[in-house]
Amino acid sequence: MDDFLDEIPVRTLGGAKVELCKLVADDAQELYGKIAQSRDHLAEFLPWPPDCDSLEDVESRLETWDMQAQMGNGACWGIFERGAKALELAGCIFIGWIHPEHRSATVSYWLFLPYVGRGLATEALELLCHYCFEELGINRLEITAAVENTKSIAVATRAGFSKEGVCREFECLRGKFLDHLRLSRLAGDVVT
């Protein structure tokens, strides 16, 4: 248990609709461009989009995500939609707040606006859950989402997460306190 997740191997995870791939420096320009195009959509429930307003900001985030994986306390994958000719960057999915002693972690995800409603986030979450439970030995994954963020909550429930309760005024987003719904999935949960 002492060496549990000294480093998280951010390897490619493949599904029918998406591939989860490690984002590298060469992805920074495309990632920045898509963030800029979907900034208002992303900022509705995420705190960081208004502050991520340069290519350098994106490059810094990529470096941070890589460092977190090397230290075993988080990891990020790009969600790439399988297209007719090539993979298209559709969003990101993360694990973080890893607690080795409890074998637990949090999950978060987001999609750029043109990719919403295609089942991509659900498949990405299912792939990541399988990887976390089967390969990393994590027992509990947790998601919190603003109660008004019904699309994100629907993704989590479709991927087998159970609602646990509401965390009152969990987040202050641009001066407004938001209640969050806490959801979890355990390695032993039966998902239908």
Image (spheres, grey):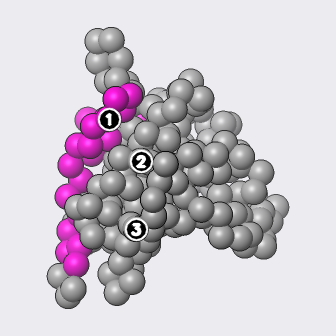
Q: Residue at label 2? A: 126
Q: Residue at label 1? A: 15
| Residue 49: image tag | none
Q: Do the residues under discs 1 and 2 have CB atoms within 8 angstroms?
A: yes
Q: Is residue 23 magenta?
A: yes
Q: Secondary structure at mark 3?
A: loop
Q: Residue lying furthest right in this view?
A: 176
Q: Is residue 124 above or below residue 187?
A: above
Q: What is the distance, in whole Å, between disc 3 and disc 2 at their CAs?
A: 14 Å
The magenta segment is: 4-32
Q: Nearer the viewer, residue 27 or 162?
A: 162
Find residue 21 and report its image quarter: top left
Amino acid bearing label 1: Gly
Q: What is the distance, in whole Å, between disc 1 and disc 2 at their CAs?
A: 9 Å
Residue 187 at x, y percent in the picture:
38, 66
Residue at 29% of width from left, 55% of height from top?
A: 131
Q: Is residue 167 left or right of residue 10?
A: right
Find residue 72 and report its image quarter: bottom left
Q: Is residue 17 left or right of residue 86?
A: right
Amino acid bearing label 3: Gly
Residue at 51% of width from left, 32% of height from top?
A: 119
Q: Is residue 98 left or right of residue 69?
A: right
Q: Residues within 10 Å of mark 1 (few under 14, many from 20)?
A: some
Residue 175 at x, y percent in the picture:
80, 62
| Residue 188: image tag | 3
